[in-house]
Amino acid sequence: MPAPPGLRLPAPLQVAWLVADPMRFFAAGRRLGPVFQIRLPGMPPEVCVATADLAEQVLAADGSGGRAGAVRRGLLGPLVGEASLLTLDEEPWWRHRRLLGPPLHGRAVARWAERAAELAAADIDRWPLGEPFALRPRMERITLEVIMRVVFGIRDAGRLRRQRDRLLRLVALGGGAAVVRLPPRPREWLLTAPAARRAGFLPTTRFARIRAQVDAILYDEMARRRRDGAPDAGPAADDVLSQLLAARDEAGRPLTDREVRDELITLLVAGHETTATALAWTFERLVRTPPVLERLREEPADGDGRAYLDAVIKESLRVRPVVPATPRLLTEPMTVGGHRVPAGWCVAAVIPLVHTDPDVFPDPGEFRPERFLGPEAAKANRAWLPFGGGRRYCAGAQLALLEMRTIVAEVLRRVELRPADPAPERVRLRAVSLVPARSARVVAARRGSAAV
Ligand code: HEM
């Protein structure tokens, strides 16, 4: 059985191309066939697939030899830890997934809609009017506030602000190239050796210090919760932290403090920038597709209107997915699309390629939410993978969709937006997300004013 064809470029050039222009890089792979190989420095060879059927085969590996945690550990381990849904595999991962399932379930997160709308409204009212500004950082502020309330249940403004600033620094340093791109051994030394810990100018040292501060606060918060209950939660402590502290596995065991710490950071890391970027892309597309924006404004806020809003969100996540791929490290060989992939290699569905397969999505570059409403909807839904799939399907998808629905509706209610520049924004790879190159620059006017 032949090995899949690969790009004829050394690994450092492949990664440089991927970072500079991810869409062209993946398109070049697809020209070799629906199954192709890429090489990234310090990683095993990766076999990529470009169609929904092949993606299904790749994601089915979650039930056998596919390890998502092992691939992510190198990149995300220092930030989220070893006891995180993102970095665990096999039985320990299942145990965590079962314990985190209930607080993130659709019904459990639905109760946060009103709070999310209030937080969005307060932020939108502070947006500049009549001058260009970038939407993505604004969206990040809103989604961080939402996740901090959902995860920690903190309402006290001062405590929230202090915690938020530290967490933002932690995520910025821990997700930055100076920490992420280092090989694991030197990185571990830089993060733990006493000599390195004294060199305050090193990004790894700054990261280790802020991580220690955040951890101390989190452990302190856990001790306080165990003693006094949730601070602001009222009769039902429904934030994720309270629920995780109360959760017990089948053997009646709770999560350790270390495990709870890792999962709290995980939810922040996995949950806030992704959702903010998805929202930024939704508006980047909407302001450049006036008929869709008009129809969305005209639809009633419930009934069919909600169906169109959902279709807009789906279409945005299709045409501009935030996460590029779903890599799995194989512990046993697998066959995909007539190619044998050995154990020790990675396989991945490339989400932007699956989402632009012209057999499923005619005129794939067009922003057309109707594809998720008409008779083609079933086929489109089957090939829709913005949250990945298999057993490792995004644990926060319901919360992300709830936030997107609520925040898009709140923006439309309060302001009119137009693009700061009519040209579409290019797709850039930033850390592990596909982001709009200029952070979705728009100009806002208050609704009903003639300034736009
Ligand atoms: C629009 C926003 C979001 C997008 C596009 C997104 C996308 C993804 C993707 C593609 C994966 C990998 C799935 C795979 O490998 O098959 C993932 C995993 C994950 N996501 Fe999300 N996500 C979003 C929001 C969130 C939120 C709000 C949370 C939590 C509050 C969250 C928590 C997680 C976790 C914990 C995992 C790891 C699941 C596991 O391995 O078991 N995500 N997400």
Image: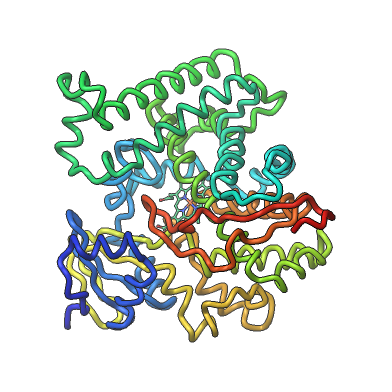
Q: Position of residue 337 (x, y in %)?
A: 30, 81
Q: Relative to residue 254, is residue 81 drawn left or right?
A: left
Q: Position of residue 245 (x, y in %)?
A: 51, 27
Q: How many badges with numbers are in the image?
A: 0
Give the answer, above or below, for where 20 lies relative to 266.
below
Give the answer, above or below, for where 193 lies relative to 81.
above
Q: Residue at x 35, y 76 (%)?
A: 27
In this view, the residue in front, 136 or 113, is 136
In the picture, the quarter occupied by the N terminus is bottom left
The color scheme shown is rainbow
In this view, the residue in front, 416 or 47, is 416
Q: Residue at x 78, y 65 (%)?
A: 305
Q: Relative to residue 123, is residue 301 drawn left or right?
A: right
Give the answer, above or below, for where 58 lies relative to 429.
below
Q: Relative to residue 62, is residue 145 drawn left or right?
A: right
Q: Position of residue 131 (x, y in %)?
A: 65, 50
Query: For residue 59, which quarter of the picture?
Result: bottom left
Q: Residue at x 64, y 21 (%)?
A: 156
Q: Position of residue 187 (x, y in %)?
A: 20, 36
Q: Residue at x 61, y 33 (%)?
A: 149
Q: Relative to residue 326, is residue 264 drawn left or right?
A: right
Query: For residue 157, which quarter of the picture?
Result: top right
In the picture, the quarter occupied by the C terminus is bottom right
Query: For residue 258, which quarter of the picture?
Result: top left
